[in-house]
Image (cartoon, helix red, strand yellow):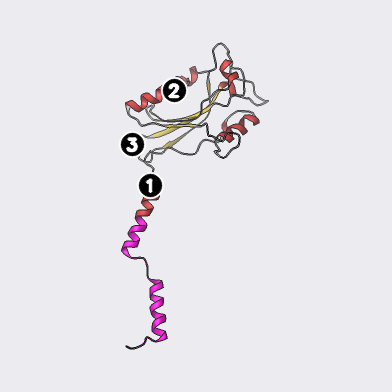
Amino acid sequence: MPQSTKSEKFALATRTRSSGPTRTEKGNKSSRSKRFYPRFKTPCINSIFPSVSHLKVSDEQRESIQAMHNPRSDIFPIPSIVDYVYATSDTAQAKAMKVVVDHGLPEGDNGEKMNSRWLRQWSGTSRSNTGALGHARRVLYLCACGYEPTTSTQRSTAASFTGCLAHVEMTTWQGGKIVRIRGYLDHNKACQAASAGRVCM
C-alpha cells in the first residue's frame, strides 16, 4: 500500500481544519440559539425600573430604595419588590384593579388629581413592538408620606413626612389597560398611623 507523502498529509490536515460546520451542526447551533434566547412575547414592557433619582426623597431613603432593587444587598437580602404583569383580558384586568383598589393607587389622570396617597414623580411612553396596543405609558409614584421636598421648595402635600419608602410604577396601554404594576407597596408604621384629614395608608 503506497505511503502518503508529507505534503499530502499537510494538505489533508489543512482541508480538515478549514472545513466549516456541517448542515447538522449548523442546525443544532440554530436550535440552541432559539432555546436559550427566546423572543420576549409580552409587547414592549421595559424591564428596567425608572431611576430612583426621579423620586423626591431624602438621601437615606434613596439609599434604602436602591438597596431594595439590588438582590445582593445586605440591607434587603430578600427582595421586597413586587412585579405583577397582566394580560388585557377582562379576568386579568379585574385582578389588576383589585391591586389598585387594595393599595389605593391612582386610576388614570383624574385619579391622580383626586388621590392624596401617591404623588407622581416621573412618566414616560414607549410604543408596542407589535403596534397592536399603541403606546404604553409608564408612571412612577411615591407615597405622599415619603415625599421630601428640597430646601428651595415647600411641601405640596398635606400628608405628614414619615420617611416612607413605598413607591410603585404602573404601566398602561392606550385605553387604560393595566399591564404591569411593580414596586415596593409596604408602608412604614408611622405612615400607616399618620393622618392629615385622612389616613395615609
Amino acid identity at mark 3 = Ala
To which residue does mark 3 refer? Answer: 132
Amino acid identity at mark 2 = Val
Task: Find the magenta span and give its range.
Answer: 3-30
Amino acid identity at mark 1 = Pro
Measured Cα–Cα span from mark 1 to mark 3? 21 Å
Q: Residue furthest right?
A: 151
- Residue 125 appears in the figure: yes
To which residue does mark 2 refer? Answer: 100
Q: Residue furthest front?
A: 1
Q: Which residue: 41% across, 22% down? A: 98
Using the image as rendered, state which of residue 183 and residue 158 is in the foreground.
183
Predominant SS of the magenta segment = helix
To which residue does mark 1 refer? Answer: 38
Q: Quadrant of the N terminus?
A: bottom left
Tell me residue 165's x, y (percent).
Answer: 57, 27
Measured Cα–Cα span from mark 3 to mark 2? 25 Å
Helix, strand or loop for disc 2: helix
Helix, strand or loop for disc 1: loop
Tell me residue 160's x, y (percent).
Answer: 61, 17
Helix, strand or loop for disc 3: loop
| Vertical relation: 116 (above or below) 84 | above
Using the image as rendered, state which of residue 150 and residue 98 is in the foreground.
98
Question: Neighbour class for label 2 at 10 Å: few (<14), some, many (≥20)?
Answer: some
Measured Cα–Cα span from mark 2 to mark 1? 31 Å
Tell me residue 9's x, y (percent).
Answer: 40, 82
- Residue 107 appears in the figure: no
**Is residue 157 rendered magenta in the image?**
no
Q: Is residue 151 left or right of residue 14?
A: right
Is the residue under label 1 in contact with that under label 2 (CB below 8 Å)?
A: no
Using the image as rendered, state which of residue 38 and residue 45 is in the foreground.
38
